[in-house]
Image (spheres, grey):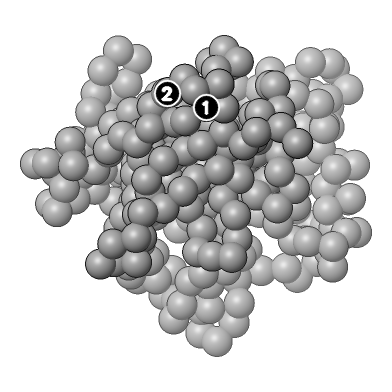
Amino acid sequence: MAQIGHGYGSEWHLMQTMGRLRVHFDDEVKRTLGAESIEWLDCNGFEDGVGLREHLQLDFLGLASAATREAWRVAWPQSGNVPNWDAVGKARVNGVDWWILVEAKASIQELHSKCNASSDSSTRKIKAVFRSARRALGITTVKDEAWLEPYYQFCNRLAILSFPGLHGIRAKLLMVYFVGDRSGPGRTCPADENAWRGAIDAMYQYLGFGKNEHVCNLLFPAFPLAVSDRIEAVSDTIPVRLVDGEHGTARIVGNNAAWLCPCGDRLPLLGTLFPPPRRPITVCPGCGRRFELYRRQDATGGVLDSVREIAPA
């Protein structure tokens, strides 16, 4: 995961939306997809104790689709930053199950990226996958280089969606565009839906991409009316209690918490408070320290109370 901004950025907004506004968000997702239902997968890393992380490539398909996952790994370079998803869900659309692969954006700059392949062989692999995707999408008006920059990330998401090795596995790409985020240094945030639509249309035109039933756009307010004038209430703090008696601070949004490990790693650790009996444990990938989230019972059944370091065995 990238470093999450406090009060801005697509990851922050998606976290608070799916944590605190889940029913409203799910209703909008179902409306956009024409779906009867939607269920979301938990982040990876909870069960194996290596820290929460996004779903990578086609790993969400599980062991039953091992051949498909391996075919993608052979086709796509496995060094560097492989494609990952901000969220993965499963929707029922007209009685049929579809995988929903989510990519969220909150600024124009988040649309922009370029291919940084480390070798010529990796570049050749990427170009070959992109050509296959363009053929599947009926795109004949652009050359290889147009898909390598400046919308490389969107292109590799399209490439996964169009991968012939999926063999009938149904998947849709859901692009969530947050409207009205806070602009700042290096962040130009569309203030209304028309501004986003103009940027999206420009991207589509540059890539030779037209409307496709497998790519859906959801324009969602970054600060819904329920919280827009009281954003300070969205994020609170709880103590982080370390085994040596020192204390730190974690920021929480709903059932999610983020804090820095005392080992000095600059990227925050993330934890989610799951219902019992699952233990919400997060492991620092840098030093191996283990932390657990604790709840305080109240009228709603329990809220985040603290993060506590687990003493080594």
Q: Earlier in the sequence, mark 1 or mark 2?
A: 1
Q: Quadrant of the N terminus?
A: top right
Characterize the local packing of mark 1: few (<14), some (14-19) or many (20 or more) Cα atoms within 10 angstroms.
some
Could you tell me which residue is drawn at 55 percent across and 43 percent down? 292
User: At label 1, which amino acid type do we have?
Assistant: Leu
Return the residue nearer the eye: 176 or 120: 176
Residue placed furthest toward the bottom: 95
- Residue 10 against residue 24 in the figure, above or below: above
Residue 6 coordinates in the image, percent (x, y): 33, 28
Question: How far apart are the two marked residues, 1 and 2, measured between alpha carbons?
Answer: 8 Å
* Quadrant position of residue 222: top left
Q: Quadrant of the C terminus?
A: top right
Could you tell me which residue is drawn at 34 percent across and 60 percent down? 297
Left or right: residue 58 compared with residue 308: right
* Quadrant position of residue 115: top right
Left or right: residue 297 compared with residue 308: left
Return the residue nearer the eye: 240 or 312: 312
Residue 147 coordinates in the image, percent (x, y): 62, 31
Q: Which residue is mark 2?
A: 248
User: At label 2, which amino acid type do we have?
Assistant: Gly
SS under mark 2: strand
SS under mark 1: loop
Q: Which mark is residue 242?
A: 1
- Asked if disc 1 and disc 2 are in contact, CB closer than 8 Å, the reply is yes
